Amino acid sequence: MQSKKIAIIGAGNAACITALAYYEFGQLRSKDVSEIEIYYDPSIPIEQVGQGTTPAVTKLIAGILNNTYCPYKDNYTNGNVVKSTLKSGISYENWGKETGKSFHPFLMANSSNHYVPHLLSKAVLESGLFKVIEKRIDDPEKEIDADIIFDCRGGRDRDKSLYTELINPLNSVILANKEEPDPSLLYTRCVATPNGWTFVIPNIDSVSYGYLYNNTITPKQRAEKNFIELFDVVPKTHINFENYMAKNMFVGERTVLNGNKLTFLEPLEASSSAFYYTVAGVAWNTIWHETRKDCNQFVQREMQRIQNFVLWHYAKGSKYNTSFWRYAGKMAKDVLSSDPELMDIVVKSRQYDRNHQRSIQMFQRRETYSQWEIGSIGHWDSII
Ligand SMILES: Cc1cc2nc3c(=O)[nH]c(=O)nc-3n(C[C@H](O)[C@H](O)[C@H](O)COP(=O)(O)OP(=O)(O)OC[C@H]3O[C@@H](n4cnc5c(N)ncnc54)[C@H](O)[C@@H]3O)c2cc1C
């Protein structure tokens, strides 16, 4: 088989993960990719959010940007050019009915990080691993000569008739930053509030906050007031969002959608960048043996699993008995009752114990539900 030329449009999280993934599959592990081009329009900024990752994505970023083939001098680990901070797990606070605070750890050998998205973008563009072209692209297949084109142009100006809505109780976020670092914060905090939940993420020189809520239940002014009361922050940016998924990840003859161009779901569990890695991998399979139809079906179901896993958290409730939590709880329970796969793995996970023979077998079979291992599901189920 002739080696392939890959083109990626965009320089945000999705484009960066896709570029690193193709460098990994097609240039580091095999010689199946001859060239990877990145086209992006520098006058269109990338999203400012998207800092939290999962272990697989951390390994990808560190593995490629720090490998010996990367000529970028001040590389990822030595210079920490993406201003990475440790994510040793996720602290769920005020969720569930019984516990006030529950920690979902990543094992030390499998831990993760937070980073600054525009610094990842800069590091990828300057890595020397990719041919970078500053150009606005309006019609990818007419303007780009490549075997596969990844369209990672973000979620603006979508033709909504080509997308379905994902089920989720949130549609708004207020962002804030505290300029003091918090060296004791070595994980992501997900704090349930009366109107949704708030992420607290450590940066090298500051702390990021995002107050997530539903503006049809909580007016913006009330959300802002509650954000200030609970976290003592100065609100900076308001963003409204929709939760959606493209009906087909493939467009035209050669184009694959990824990132916000493909899908968006609120950030509980920070699963987006790992999903972009999955989409890149699935699209790679179409080159070799899978059909586009099978790949699209797999990706659709995978996104539905992520949607449902996030909803499972809302089904557990919080210490607040408010309009938001009643709405979110009912929405979650209605959806989960039609997902036997998730319910089965939750039940199985209750027998999970690393010291038990049956559990070792379960672990060795690597039973998972999308990005989550059975052990994590069991741990989560027991702590809230
Ligand atoms: C509050 C909040 C918190 C979040 N937290 C997380 C998190 O912790 N972890 C996580 O993984 N995700 C998180 N996300 C999701 C996050 O938004 C996405 O991971 C990320 O922003 C994906 O962006 P993108 O790369 O698809 O698009 P963008 O960042 O919008 O990038 C689009 C790129 O396309 C280029 N472009 C656009 N149009 C053209 C054109 N015509 N020609 C050429 N180039 C073009 C632009 O220049 C830009 O480089 C969060 C989202 C929200 C709202």
Image (spheres, rainbow, N blue to C red):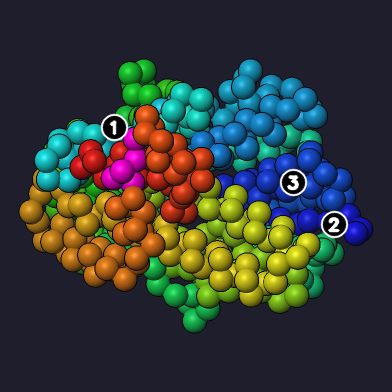
Residue at the front extreme? 357
Look at the image and give the residue range highlighted in magenta: 349-353
Say which residue label 3 marks: 25
Up/down of 181 relative to 296, above or below: above
Residue in the picture at 62% in, 71% down:
294
| Quarter location, residue 360 | top left
Q: Secondary structure at mark 1?
A: strand
Q: Earlier in the sequence, mark 3 or mark 2?
A: 2
Q: Amino acid at mark 3?
A: Phe
* x then y, percent, for residue 301: 49, 66
Does dot 3 land on a helix, a strand or a loop?
A: helix
Report which quarter residue 118 is drawn in.
Answer: top right
Q: Which residue is mark 2?
A: 4
- Measured as percent of width and height from the top left, residue 269 is found at 38, 46
**Circle 1/circle 3 CB separation < 8 Å:** no
Question: What number is the disc on residue 123?
Answer: none
- Reading the image, the residue beneath label 1 is 103
Q: Is residue 119 above or below residue 298?
A: above
Kind of residue indicated by mark 1: Phe
69 in magenta: no
Nearer to the camera, 170 or 248: 248
**Residue at position x 51%, y 36% in the image:** 55
Main secondary structure along the magenta-highlighted residues: loop
Residue in the picture at 56% in, 66% down = 298
Q: Confirm whether residue 56 shows in the render.
A: yes
Which quadrant of the figure has residue 236? top left
Q: Are marks 1 and 2 in contact (CB under 8 Å)?
A: no
